[in-house]
Image (cartoon, helix red, strand yellow):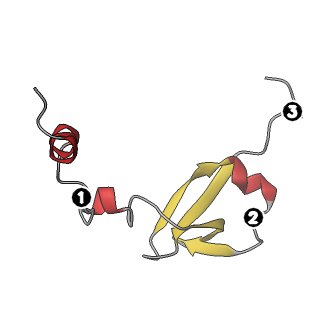
Amino acid sequence: MKDGIHPAYGPVVFRDRSTGSLLLTRSTLAGRGVGGETVEVDGTPYPVVDVDVSSDSHPFWTGRGRVMDTEGRVEKFRRRYGAGS
């Protein structure tokens, strides 16, 4: 790889705003000085990035999802326009 053209890649903590859960991973956001805020994980400070939705709070992954349309498309069409011939 060429030197000087790739963004800095290092450890960063993603924090879910709704649940407060922390996920320590590596990202190119670490080199951008994200907000300047840090959080300690196991006694080591890491830059933190706040996210609105993660797998910890997303309705699909938590099982709190709602089904909006329980009626199939064909049945809805037949009810609206008749059964047809």
Locate residue 3: give its quadrant: top right
Which of the pair 75/27 is nearer the observer?
75
Question: What is the distance, in whole Å, between disc 1 and disc 3 at their CAs?
Answer: 46 Å
Locate residue 69: give its quadrant: bottom left
Report helix, strand or loop for mark 3.
Answer: loop
Amino acid of disc 1: Val
Which of the pair 64/16 is nearer the observer?
64
Write down the residue under mark 1. Answer: 67
Q: Report the residue at 54% width, 69% height from top.
A: 15
Report helix, strand or loop for mark 1.
Answer: loop
Question: What is the distance, in whole Å, between disc 2 and disc 3 at their CAs?
Answer: 20 Å
- Disc on the earlier residue, 1 or 3: 3
Count neighbours of disc 2 (C-alpha within 10 A) and say few if under 14, some if 14 to 19, many if 20 or more.
some
Q: Report the residue at 18% width, 44% height from top.
A: 72
Q: Position of residue 23 (x, y in %)?
A: 49, 61
Amino acid of disc 3: Ile
Write down the residue under mark 2. Answer: 34
Report helix, strand or loop for mark 2.
Answer: loop
Q: Are marks 1 and 3 in contact (CB under 8 Å)?
A: no
Image quarter where the N terminus lies is top right
Q: Is residue 8 left or right of residue 85?
A: right
Write down the residue under mark 3. Answer: 5
Q: Nearer the viewer, mark 1 or mark 3?
A: 1
Q: Position of residue 25 (x, y in %)?
A: 55, 53
Amino acid of disc 2: Val
- Disc on the earlier residue, 2 or 1: 2
